Amino acid sequence: MFVDKKALSPLIATMLLVVFALVIGTITMNWGKSYVDKIADEPETGSIESSIFISINDIDSPLKELQIQHITGRINEAEYKQKEKELI
């Protein structure tokens, strides 16, 4: 039986490229999964409740006090804008 050697070389090259792509994809997916799992295990530090520590003694202007009231949700945006216009 006669084998056409010209057709065998592109077939092998295609198979090697497919295997290479699968290996790279597998490595990337495993790295991504471990990275996401590591981030999910870390405690969350960016929440608003844990990042605002302002003493009343630190507020030295009415505008700053107004901003703090708006940030903490004591007044809504419409009230904030109206009081801000009065102060400025």
Image (cartoon, helix red, strand yellow):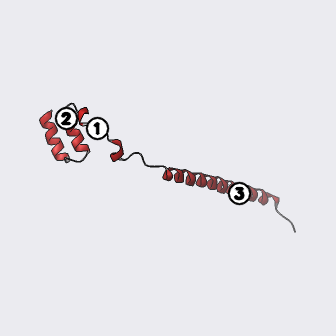
Find numbered disc 1 in the image and state the secondary structure of the residue it sits on: loop
| Label 2 – label 1 distance at C-alpha | 15 Å
Q: Is 2 or 31 nearer to us in this picture? A: 31
Residue identified by numbered label 2: 63
Residue at the top extreme of this rendering: 60
Q: Is 14 or 69 nearer to us in this picture? A: 69
Q: Give the amino acid at mark 1.
A: Ile
Residue 27, given in percent of the width and then of the height, sits at 63, 53
Q: Give the amino acid at mark 3.
A: Thr
Tag nearer the camera, 2 or 3: 2
Residue 41, given in percent of the width and then of the height, sits at 50, 52
Counting the numbered discs, the total is: 3
Packing grade of label 2 (10 A; few <14, some 14-19, many >=20) is: some
Residue identified by numbered label 3: 14
Mark closest to the chain's N terminus, 3 or 1: 3
Instruction: Specify whether 27 is left or right of 16.
Output: left
Q: Is residue 51 above or below residue 17?
A: above
Q: Residue at point 72% right, 55% down?
A: 16
Instruction: Specify whether 86 is left or right of 53.
Output: left
Q: Is residue 22 above or below residue 54?
A: below
Q: Is 7 or 13 nearer to us in this picture? A: 13
Mark closest to the chain's N terminus, 2 or 3: 3
Q: Which mark is on residue 68?
A: none
Residue identified by numbered label 1: 54
| Label 2 – label 3 distance at C-alpha | 68 Å
Q: Quadrant of residue 57?
A: top left
Mark closest to the chain's N terminus, 2 or 1: 1
| Label 3 – label 1 distance at C-alpha | 64 Å
